[in-house]
Image (tube, grey):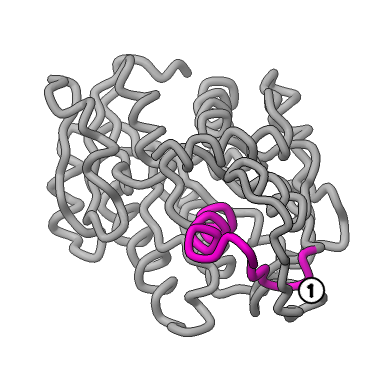
Amino acid sequence: MILKDRHILVTGGAGFIGSHVVDRLVQHNRVTVFDNLSSGIMAYLERHIDNPDFTFIEGDLIDPDAISQALDGIDMVFHLAANPDVRLGAEDTKVHLEQNVLTTYNLIEAMRTADASEIVFTSTSTVYGMASVLPTPEDYGPLVPISLYGASKLACEALISSYCHTFDMKAWLYRFANIVGDRGSHGVLVDFINKLRVDPFALEILGSGKQKKSYLDVVDCVDAMVYGVEHSNELVNIFNIGSEDTIDVVGIADIVTRKMGYSDVEYRFTGGAHGGGGWKGDVPSMLLAIEKIKALGWKPPHNSSQSIEMAVDSLLRS
């Protein structure tokens, strides 16, 4: 299936990854963005405002009527709207239930009655929890997430899969590594840059600094998403998306301090929970097996260090 001449709804399309999805899809499709702008930024979509193939709707997935109206004429959905803050779940136990699980239910239930039968969903590596197999393949199990965020995304996957089998829908579920790049608004890079702008002589690093994870540039991530849709056609298509290596947090700190022109920065570590993680729910080591999507013909053009370097450059320019 080629993503061309479709009418696609992008939930969360004003956000970090969502706006890059819009940039890609609007080249060959009609795109409607549905976003409540709680974390999305309208400036990310400014270049498309005068495009007749682009529509923006300010609305909330908590409102079933609003999403039902937005689905009028839509034949495919890219569902990126969610609360992405993994740490927040330890402070507010309802946020990921309400903003991830219940909103996903509202969306797919509205799709069921609107004849929009295809959905692309952005999931996460955190559904695997502290996997004993690295790199972790899509068929790894049992899935035991250790954060409420990971649990919410796994619940969303289960809901979408069950709707596909019950109501003849089709889904692409993408489990992301850490996605970084232009327009990023949270995560370790933003945290480090903000801290160093306040104090260029000392940098607090959450956890042990030895956490090792996979990072992928956001444009490469969107390329993989589109490629997967165009080259797989199961009822429920599940793919990991990430790079094929890792970088530890100290390595990231080294890149950020160098790019900002600082030297002799003192790193101060908080210690960490769960074997050196930065917070409750932080997975200290993550590397996804991506053989499944590579078998289709896609592979990441940049490794983790390159993705971090490109992302820091973009964030410092913004």
Answer with left or right where residue 133 lies relative to residue 261: right
Whether residue 201 appears in magenta in the rendering, the answer is: yes
Answer with left or right where residue 65 lies relative to residue 120: left
- Is residue 168 in sight in this rendering? no
What x and y, as percent, mark residue 297? 69, 18
What x and y, as percent, mark residue 234? 58, 33
Magenta-colored span: 187-209
Residue that sits furthest to the right in the current view: 133
Tally of marks:
1
Residue type beneath disc 1: Gly
Answer with left or right where residue 256 lies relative to residue 52: right
Q: Quadrant of the C terminus?
A: top left
Determine the image quadrant of residue 31.
Answer: top left
The residue wearing badge 1 is 276
* Residue at the (70%, 78%) spot, across then down: 270
- Is residue 279 in sight in this rendering? yes
What x and y, as percent, mark residue 20? 40, 33
* Residue at the (79%, 74%) spot, across then down: 276
Q: Nearer the viewer, residue 186 or 3?
A: 186
Q: Secondary structure at mark 1?
A: loop
* Residue at the (41%, 45%) spot, across then down: 16
* Residue at the (53%, 25%) spot, across then down: 223
What x and y, as percent, mark residue 181? 52, 39
Q: Nearer the viewer, residue 143 or 257?
A: 257
Whether residue 90 appears in magenta in the rendering, the answer is: no
141 up-or-down from 167: above or below = below
254 up-or-down from 75: above or below = below
159 up-or-down from 44: above or below = below
